[in-house]
Amino acid sequence: TEKSYVMIKPDGVSRQIVGDIISRFERRGYKLVALKTLIPSEELAKEHYIDLAKKPFYGGLVKYITSGTPVVAMVWQGKDVIRQGRRLVGATNPLDAAPGSIRGDFCVSVGRNIIHASDSHESATKEIGLWFHEKELATEYKPIAWDMIMADN
Ligand code: GTP
Ligand code: MG
């Protein structure tokens, strides 16, 4: 099944809501395939958001991601995880994010919106490759309730 790149941004780490965020993906039934903390380099942050390079907020966005507080970089796997991950995260502008979503529950500013999740298969593939080495991904194990959660019959 598909994989998504999900990243708790420095504000999420600083606010100590890492556990809550991870719980939301776990309880939905998604499988944790990789996780690490790191302080992203400017080069990595710029590449991650390269599609936004012409936006007026790009410089500030890169500065925010590379502030010196770590991010939590993760790969989650499971049925429709790219699309559902975006729903768990909520709208880009937290003021448009539904209560119950991560952004809708925890923040109010688009420049401090706590979390990233891949927005397409194409970006998931790119982002997983950018943030992780292939050997860091543990895709082969099966969570205990996997067959029950994934059953579609
Ligand atoms: P990510 O999951 O972080 O990629 O967010 P997104 O996919 O919901 O939005 P998008 O990729 O368009 O923008 C990436 C990030 O840039 C957002 O999460 C915001 O942190 C930031 N951003 C987007 N739009 C604005 C804006 O209008 N102003 C500011 N200050 N930041 C913005
Ligand atoms: Mg995006």
Image (tube, helix red, strand yellow):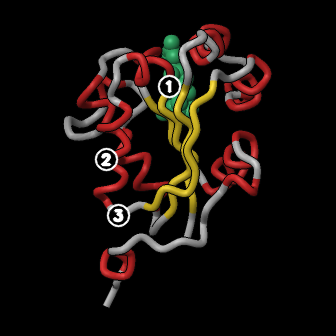
x, y (%) of residue 115? 45, 31
Which is in the foreground here, disc 1 or disc 2?
A: 2
Q: CA distance from mark 3 to mark 1?
A: 22 Å
Mark 3 lies on a secondary structure that is: loop
Q: Quadrant of the C terminus?
A: bottom left
Quadrant assignment for the N terminus? bottom right
Left or right: where does residue 16 sit relative to residue 131? left
* Among numbered discs 3 and 1, the one appearing first in the sequence: 1
Q: Is mark 3 within 8 Å of ligand 1?
A: no
Amino acid type, mark 2: Ser
CB of residue at label 1: within 8 Å of ligand 1?
A: yes
Using the image as rendered, state which of residue 80 and residue 55 is in the foreground.
Answer: 80
**Which residue is found at the position 36% from the left and 74% from the top?**
144
Residue at 68% in and 28% down: 49
Mark 3–mark 1 contact, CB under 8 Å? Answer: no
Residue 130 falls left or right of residue 120 = right
Q: Secondary structure at mark 2?
A: helix
How far across and how far down the image is residue 51, in percent? 71, 31
Q: Position of residue 120 (x, y in %)?
A: 59, 52
Residue beneath the point at 65% across and 15% down: 62
Q: Earlier in the sequence, mark 3 or mark 2?
A: 2
Query: From what the image shows, is residue 140 above or below residue 57?
Result: below
Which amino acid lies under the numbered mark 3 shown in the image of this protein? Gly
Name the side, left or right, on which 41 lies relative to 27. Answer: right
Q: CA distance from mark 3 to mark 2?
A: 10 Å
Give the distance between the C-alpha atoms of the residues marked 1 and 2, in whole angstroms: 16 Å
Residue 23 - label: 2
Q: Position of residue 5 (x, y in %)?
A: 58, 46
Residue bearing mark 1: 9
